[in-house]
Image (cartoon, rainbow, N blue to C red):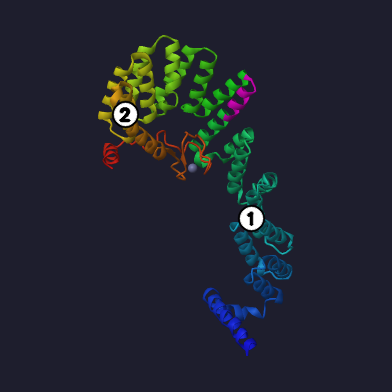
Amino acid sequence: MMDFQAYWLLVIPVFFGLGWLAARVDIRHLLSESRALPASYFKGLNFLLNEQTDKAIESFIEVAQTDQQSVELQFALGGLFRRRGEVDRATKMHQSLLDRSDLTPQQTTQALHELAEDYLKAGFYDRAEALFIELKKTALSDVAIRSLLDIYVTEKEWLKAIDTAQELGGNNSDMGSKEIAHFYCELALIEYSRSNFEAAKKQLEEALLWNKKCVRAYIIQGQWAKQNGEFEKAVEYWLYIEQQSPDYLFLIADSFMETMKQLNRLDEAILLLRGWVERFPTLDLLSTLFKSLLESRGGEVAYQSIKEEFTRNPSLGSLDKYLEAQLVTVAPELRSDLQLIRDLVHQHNVKTSYYQCHTCGFKAKTYFWHCPACAGWDTYPPKRNSDSDSDNQSHTKLSM
Ligand SMILES: [Zn+2]
């Protein structure tokens, strides 16, 4: 009696399973085809439903060697395995496809592409690269070149990346030139780190040939000049940024102020910086202004200036700076309460203030030229999310 009940307990889920299957597979179609399909096909399906994927693959490969119709099935399973992160299985599936002698040229290309994607996902860049080079001769050449470019960027093979980006050329040339300028900047930084200063300089010149507004190249040139004690030259490079891409000034503001101090041109620098803050009321520029004023003009002047800025552009960031400035001048007996408030605002500000990639939404505390998440170039707007340029938004932020 017990055995009989246990048997039925097994049968019920099987019926449910069949119902599930029928909902997803056109069962009549399957039945009409079934006489044409070899037994290994059903064996494979059975293993798959029982989560015995290894055995399932072996069965499908057995089918594959005999039956042309299973080609699409193998592609589908291979893709499925890769999406699930089972790259070994995906590779095996696609390799067995390539072992077949009955593929059309189009199917062979597709299988090569799938296999290259498997290698890429597994991190076998050399193998993926070899296949993508092969695929450049096929109808998938655009896809192959784009993938090769991604590989070279990941592997930091900048010279190859430059050649490959040039191959892409044509349809998207403006974006291509900007990318190539970045690749030369990367090369320049490598040369500089090896003390090959002349070579480094040449690479930056190349960068500027590809993109004459390459902010990054001007920033680096200025930094190198400053390191060499060529302060006038450094200032000259950075003032190009003021003319060409002023919204990036926050990246050099601190260095700029230090350099101008060395040149005894601090008054002029503070005047410039005030102008920048007025045009781009960002937290970074405001911080530089506060620091410079505090050092050169003392607490009271620094406080008054930041107060002015805060009134003009109220935001969480400027409130944070305003409270910090107030702390410098406040009477000692009021200090501890104010410190408490400032700490709270500051903590909140640090937590909610970030740079954000406009392509993939990745949030970062530091500014990136190359998104670490989606690998896009120049995808970070040159300001923090909290540096709103809309007055409405600033007020909204304050009223919370
Ligand atoms: Zn991104």
The residue lying at 54 percent from left, 78 percent from top is 22
User: What amino acid is at disc 2?
Assistant: Leu
- Give coordinates of residue 84: x percent, y percent: 59, 58
User: As displayed, is residue 182 above or below residue 148?
Assistant: above
Crowding near the residue tagged with mark 1, few <14, some 14–19, many ≥20 C-alpha atoms within 10 Å? many
| Farthest residue, direction top | 264
Secondary structure type for disc 1: helix
Secondary structure type for disc 2: helix
- Give coordinates of residue 3: x percent, y percent: 64, 87
> Which of the 4 quarters of the picture holds residue 147?
top right
The residue lying at 31 percent from left, 31 percent from top is 337
User: As displayed, is residue 307 above or below residue 127?
Assistant: above
Q: Which residue is mark 2?
A: 323
Q: Is residue 185 left or right of residue 323?
A: right
Give the number of the mark in front: 2 or 1. Answer: 2
For label 2, being within 8 Å of ligand 1 is answered no
Mark number displayed over residue 389: none
Residue 214 in sight in this render = no
Residue 31 in sight in this render = yes
Nearer the observer, 93 or 364: 364
Q: Is residue 221 left or right of residue 111?
A: left
Whichever of callouts 2 and 1 sits on the residue coming sooner in the sequence is: 1
Let me know if residue 33 is in the magenta part.
no
User: What amino acid is at disc 1?
Assistant: Glu
Quarter of the image with the C terminus in it? top left
Q: Which residue is mark 1?
A: 114
**Segment colored magenta:** 186-196
